[in-house]
């Protein structure tokens, strides 16, 4: 891929919740996002923004910085903070997965296999053998 060409990895992210901003600040935020490299589409819906951007050229942190630089405030509720943190994680995983030969499916399979191996199956007792013998003698 050449520099400046759009990539196949585009993400649409909706900034959830009403932005704490005036109409002038929202218009400035939209203008700022349109000029930001990697942003392919910006849509304003009252006090919400829908932003589509190219992961190879732009991140959610860049989008947030462009919005807050205009004076508009992002939602700071715990739910909004968690959603944005998960969105950053999703972007990081997607960006890292674009260079991977194995791909996302192999990572998911490995994660599920790891969880399965750590899971307690049946009547498995994790205590050391000598503790089990001691406890069995004490219960007789």
Image: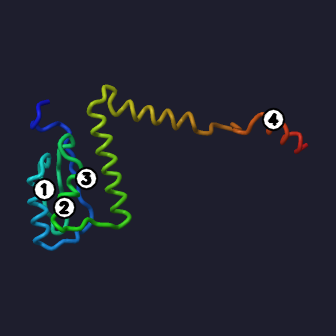
As measured in the structure, the alpha-carbon distance from the residue carrying label 1 to the one carrying label 3 is 12 Å
**Residue at the farthest right position:** 140
Q: Earlier in the sequence, mark 3 or mark 4?
A: 3
Note whether 40 is above or below 8 in the view shown. below
User: In this view of the protein, which residue sits in the foreground, 58 or 78?
Assistant: 58
User: In this view of the protein, which residue sits in the foreground, 104 or 99?
Assistant: 99
Q: Label 1, on which residue?
A: 33
As measured in the structure, the alpha-carbon distance from the residue carrying label 2 to the one carrying label 3 is 10 Å
Note whether 87 is above or below 78 in the view shown. above
As measured in the structure, the alpha-carbon distance from the residue carrying label 4 to the one carrying label 2 is 62 Å
Q: Earlier in the sequence, mark 4 or mark 1?
A: 1
Q: Earlier in the sequence, mark 1 or mark 2?
A: 1
As measured in the structure, the alpha-carbon distance from the residue carrying label 1 to the one carrying label 2 is 7 Å
Residue 125 falls in image quadrant = top right
Q: Are marks 4 and 2 in contact (CB under 8 Å)?
A: no
> Which element type, helix, strand or loop, lies under badge 2?
helix
Question: Residue 128 location, x and y as percent?
Answer: 75, 36
Labels 4, 2: front one: 2
**Which residue sits at x=35%, y=60%?**
81
Q: Which mark is residue 61?
A: 3
Question: Residue 108 location, x and y as percent?
Answer: 40, 35
Packing grade of label 2 (10 A; few <14, some 14-19, many >=20) is: many
> Where, quadrant-wise, is the N terminus in this rendering?
top left
**Residue at the farthest front position:** 69
Q: Which mark is residue 67?
A: 2
Q: Is residue 136 left or right of residue 15?
A: right
Question: Residue 40 location, x and y as percent?
Answer: 12, 48
Q: Label 4, on which residue?
A: 130
């Amino acid at each position: 891929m050449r520099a400046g060409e759009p990539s196949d990895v585009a993400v649409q992210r909706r900034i959830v919740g009403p932005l704490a901003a005036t109409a002038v600040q929202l218009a400035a935020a939209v203008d700022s996002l349109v000029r930001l490299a990697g942003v392919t589409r910006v849509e304003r819906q009252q006090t919400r923004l829908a932003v589509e951007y190219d992961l190879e050229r732009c991140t959610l942190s860049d989008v947030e910085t462009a919005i807050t630089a205009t004076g508009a405030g992002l939602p700071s509720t715990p739910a909004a903070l968690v959603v944005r943190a998960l969105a950053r994680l999703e972007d990081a995983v997607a960006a890292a997965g674009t260079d991977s030969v194995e791909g996302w499916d192999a990572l998911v399979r490995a994660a599920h296999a790891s969880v399965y191996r750590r899971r307690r199956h049946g009547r498995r007792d994790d205590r050391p053998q000598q503790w089990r013998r001691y406890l069995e003698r004490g219960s007789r």
